Amino acid sequence: MNLSTSFSRTCGAAAVALALGLAAGSALAADTKLDGSEEVPPVTTSATGENMVKVAADGAVSGKVTTKGIDATAAHIHNGAKGKNGPVIIPLKKGDGGDFMVPADAKLTEAQMKDYKDGNLYVNVHSAAHPGGEIRDQMEP
């Protein structure tokens, strides 16, 4: 193998590694935080959460929401614009350690998918102290 071939292979491998790293970074960058300031009305709380819910092109929903500093009673995906409350469209299942999982068969309807693309879906977590919701995150495609 000559120097030119070796250089090309090294550059090609580096490009693949960079692309994979960027793809992994993109997936992590999509995760967003839940906090009380996004609730309607805003809630003063030290509770936080991480929204790791993903929506596929066909409307399939997967992932989970993790929480800290909250004795959560429920979590849901709601239909509603930023600054507005709306109805539950997907109840999340409570798991271990403050995690709420999206049910395996969860899928958005065509209208809900449009609302998602328009930024009109949100995740929130409820507690006994704040039954209407203690922390919230507006979902963005």
Image (cartoon, helix red, strand yellow):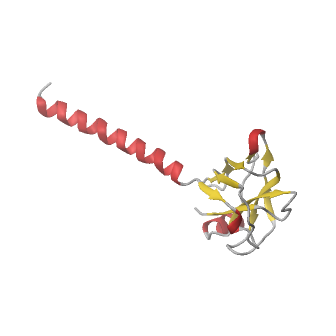
Q: Which residue is the extreme one toward the top?
A: 1
List x then y, in percent, for residue 59: 66, 56
Query: Quick one: 115 or 68, which is closer to the camera?
Result: 68
Could you tell me which quadrant the N terminus lies in?
top left
Is 10 situated above or below 61?
A: above
| Residue 85 visible in the picture | yes
Is 52 situated above or below 97?
A: below
Image point 47% across, 48% down: which residue?
25
Query: Quick one: 121 or 47, which is closer to the camera?
Result: 47
Image point 71% across, 62% down: which residue?
136
Image point 67% across, 48% down: which residue?
62
Q: Is residue 9 left or right of residue 58?
A: left
List x then y, in percent, for residue 99: 73, 44
| Residue 104 visible in the picture | no
Could you tell me which quadrant the C terminus lies in?
bottom right
**Image quarter of residue 90:** bottom right
